[in-house]
């Protein structure tokens, strides 16, 4: 295995010591010479407006639900249950779908499951699959260096600059980032017909992600108020919560916490965020071993998403699950003197 510092960006997308399947992104040298970002101001504006609309809608849903809770009647158990169900399902679409399968190719899945995960991930309102994967691959390639769309570590020294950096990595970047070139970063997905079918219907899935919890609320309570609560809790508040979960990772998981393994960036592990992030807060583990499907590298590191992948593997539904070997773990152990 190579030393962490000598890895090329393309190699960084592949965990050391784990064989790369043919479907992984092409190596740097194999790619045609093309720009990493698209110089299209209109497209950039549309992407930034999209984020603002999704964020404001989520926040509006949360404020409405708080008003209803205090002014009309306390939130029902059905609404909280619907929130939990959709937080988990759409969260899985993001973590084991968008992130670990589509971006990092950490396991193989049948088309029906890939399409389902793509649809669930789309419901989060964080952009279509191709855009999300391209942006996230760009993050891994440039992590904590100029060109990283959401590094908290590029704003200089001192407390004020640190806070500015965290603000940028939390939410500021969503209206500032460059548009990644999908032809450069996500060529494998552009050639993936079922996934492009999902990608093209992105707004339909967002609408479905709002309609389904409303219908479930109606079915459970038999009232229009129940449907409204379903829409708010399972739709808009769930969207707001999952946006924040991802922003915890983009910001806090490159600033606070421990750096247990060598990686080319400043990514960190955060125990306290493991449950709400469904395991994604083992972010230093992830940057050190980007293709690993299971981010838990010790028995006490809870990774719910990795657990779901392991269950799907046991059931024979997914295959070729990338795991970190004991040897790789040992070789990448962080050197305490470098902290
Ligand atoms: Zn990643
Ligand atoms: Zn990161």
Image (cartoon, rainbow, N blue to C red):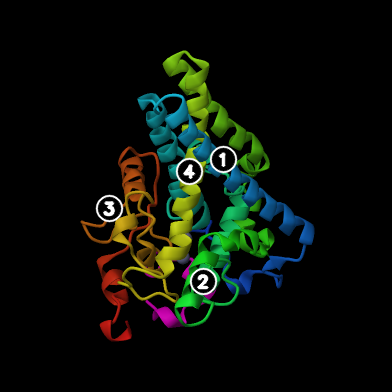
Q: Are marks 2 and 4 in contact (CB under 8 Å)?
A: no
Residue 10 visible at all: no
Query: At x 38% / y 59%, what residue is drawn?
Result: 292
Q: Nearer the viewer, mark 2 or mark 4?
A: 2
Magenta segment boundaries in residue numbering: 1-18
The secondary element bearing badge 4 is classed as: helix
Residue picked out by circle 1? 60
Q: Are marks 3 and 4 in contact (CB under 8 Å)?
A: no
Distance between the alpha carbons at the discs numbered 2 and 4: 28 Å
Query: Of marks 4 and 1, which one's residue comes earlier in the chain?
Result: 1
Distance between the alpha carbons at the discs numbered 3 and 1: 32 Å
Residue picked out by circle 2? 165
Query: Of marks 3 and 1, which one's residue comes earlier in the chain?
Result: 1
Quarter where residue 34 is shown: bottom right
88 or 297: which is nearer to us? 88
Distance between the alpha carbons at the discs numbered 3 and 4: 18 Å
Q: Specify few, some or many for label 3: CA neighbours under 10 Å numbering under 14, 14-19, or 20 or more.
A: many
Q: Position of residue 199 (x, y in %)?
A: 64, 44
Please identify the quadrant where the N terminus is shown. bottom left
The secondary element bearing badge 3 is classed as: loop
Q: Specify few, some or many for label 4: CA neighbours under 10 Å numbering under 14, 14-19, or 20 or more.
A: many
Does the segment drawn in magenta span residue 5? yes
Residue picked out by circle 3? 302
Q: Position of residue 122 (x, y in %)?
A: 57, 42
Residue picked out by circle 4? 93
Query: Of marks 1 and 2, which one's residue comes earlier in the chain?
Result: 1
Q: Is residue 141 left or right of residue 96?
A: right
Please identify the quadrant where the C terminus is shown. bottom left
Q: Nearer the viewer, mark 3 or mark 1?
A: 1
Q: Specify few, some or many for label 2: CA neighbours under 10 Å numbering under 14, 14-19, or 20 or more.
A: many
């Amino acid at each position: 295995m190579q030393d962490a510092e000598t890895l090329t960006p393309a190699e960084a997308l592949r965990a050391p010591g784990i064989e790369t399947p043919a479907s992984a992104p092409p190596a740097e040298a194999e790619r045609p010479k093309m720009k990493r970002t698209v110089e299209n101001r209109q497209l950039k504006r549309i992407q930034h407006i999209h984020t603002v609309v999704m964020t404001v809608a989520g926040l509006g849903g949360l404020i409405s639900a708080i008003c209803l809770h205090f002014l009309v009647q306390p939130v029902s158990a059905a609404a909280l249950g619907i929130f939990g169900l959709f937080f988990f399902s759409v969260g899985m679409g993001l973590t084991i779908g968008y992130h670990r399968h589509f971006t990092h190719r950490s396991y193989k899945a049948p088309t029906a499951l890939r399409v389902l995960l793509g649809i669930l991930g789309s419901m989060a309102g964080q952009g279509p699959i191709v855009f999300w994967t391209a942006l996230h691959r760009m993050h891994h390639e440039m992590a904590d260096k100029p060109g990283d769309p959401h590094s908290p570590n590029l704003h200089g020294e001192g407390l004020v600059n640190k806070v500015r950096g965290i603000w940028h990595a939390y939410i500021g970047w969503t209206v500032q980032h460059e548009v990644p070139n999908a032809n450069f970063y996500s060529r494998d997905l552009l050639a993936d017909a079922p996934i492009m079918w999902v990608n093209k219907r992105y707004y339909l899935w967002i609408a479905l992600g709002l309609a389904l919890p409303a219908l479930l609320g109606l079915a459970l309570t038999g009232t229009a108020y129940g449907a409204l609560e379903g829409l708010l809790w399972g739709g808009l508040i769930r969207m707001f919560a999952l946006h924040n979960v991802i922003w915890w990772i983009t910001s806090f998981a490159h600033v606070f916490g421990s750096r247990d393994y060598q990686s080319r960036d400043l990514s960190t592990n955060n125990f306290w965020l493991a449950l709400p992030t469904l395991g994604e807060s083992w972010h230093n583990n992830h940057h050190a071993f980007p293709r690993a499907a299971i981010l838990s590298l010790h028995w006490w590191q809870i990774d719910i998403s990795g657990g779901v992948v392991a269950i799907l593997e046991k059931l024979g539904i997914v295959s070729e699950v990338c795991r970190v070997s004991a040897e790789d773990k040992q070789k990448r152990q962080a050197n305490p003197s470098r902290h």
